[in-house]
Amino acid sequence: MTGTIFNVQRYSVHDGPGIRTTAFLKGCPLTCSWCHNPEGVEPTPEILVLADRCAGCLACVEACPQPKVERADGTPWTNRAVCQVCGRCVAACVRGARKLVGREVTVEGLADELERDRPFYEESGGGVTLSGGEPLMQAEFALAVLELCRKRGLHTALDTSGAAPADVAARAAALSDLVLFDLKQLDPDMHRNTVGAELEPILENLRAIDGSGTETWIRFPLIPEATDARENLRALADTVLSLTNTRRVHVLPFHRTAADKYARLERSWRHDDLPDASEGRAARVVDYLTGRGLDARLGG
């Protein structure tokens, strides 16, 4: 069995306890406009373009067999509607202005890669985390990786939006020592409009995972003009307080570092004018959630 990943991040300290290695799986069913990993949305490999490295030599145009890389005002660009991501333009670019994001790995191959840092896990109480994209979009692959890592004695964490069939979410929770569950917008209509999915199935998965006894941490992205409204914060607190076992909430302030990723994917970034979530605002949100009886923390 194989799956497609776009990054393996070593020495991660924000995706669960201790020092961890996080594997990022490609593919996500949601359409969050503020997504910080846009290279993880599409399920298949993609071409990244680093325009500042381009010398305009057009070697990529010559290498493209279709051609799929065409000239626009003398500048190479990727016709993504027909690009087959063969990688020849990447190989032809001597300046590294083109990169392939996304690679196919086997279950055993990824588990071996994740296990390399076992000494760090054992020393720090860390382990491995599957993230994305939405890792459960590659359900059987993700479940097989979690199962194999558990068999090897590694602490497993799953970072999920909850946008998955109920049986898949339940199986994943059973194979995870920790679930990092993203909650964004708690109004059903706004959730549908901003996240691109129905809210209730996600909440049903959250309630089921919480009821299973698997340790669960809520991750809440604080997005100005999108998730930081007072009504949404109140609904967030009410939702978490309605759970049986889960009280921990990590507030993740919005920042603009993803803007370069959109440019490299030659996609528009809808938040050019959106400011970072201020430290003061984030701290006030943490204080509010703490005052409601939650174990609220900034970042992580």
Image (spheres, rainbow, N blue to C red):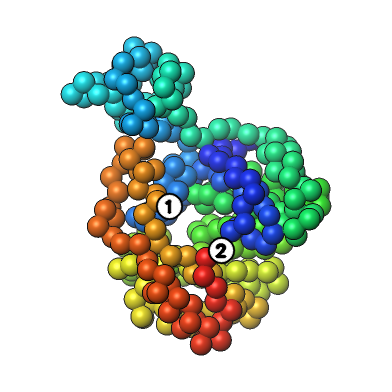
Mark 1 belongs to which amino acid? His
- State the image coordinates of residue 148 (x, y, percent, origin top left): 76, 46
The residue that appears at 75% across and 60% down in the rendered structure is: 125
In this rendering, does residue 71 appear at all?
yes
Q: Earlier in the sequence, mark 2 or mark 1?
A: 1
Q: Farthest residue in the left direction?
A: 73
* Residue linked to disc 2: 300
- State the image coordinates of residue 116 (x, y, percent, origin top left): 74, 41
In this rendering, does residue 130 appear at all?
no
* Labels 2, 1: front one: 2
Quick one: SS at disc 1?
loop
- Mark 2: give few (<14), some (14-19) or many (20+) Cα within 10 Å: some
- State the image coordinates of residue 272 (x, y, percent, origin top left): 26, 53
- State the image coordinates of residue 139 (x, y, percent, origin top left): 60, 48
The residue that appears at 65% across and 78% down in the rendered structure is: 245
The residue that appears at 70% across and 72% down in the rendered structure is: 213
Do the residues bearing badges 2 and 1 touch, measured as CB atoms within 8 Å? no
Q: Is residue 244 left or right of residue 118?
A: left
Image quadrant containing the C terminus: bottom right
Q: Closest to the observer: 32 or 212?
A: 32
Q: Closest to the observer: 217 or 290?
A: 290
Q: Is residue 122 left or right of residue 95?
A: right
The residue that appears at 58% across and 32% down in the rendered structure is: 104
Residue 144: which disc? none
Mark 2 belongs to which amino acid? Gly
* Residue linked to disc 1: 36
For residue 250, above or below residue 79: below
Quick one: SS at disc 2?
loop
Question: Distance from label 2 to label 1 (Cα)?
Answer: 15 Å
Q: Is residue 100 left or right of residue 65?
A: right
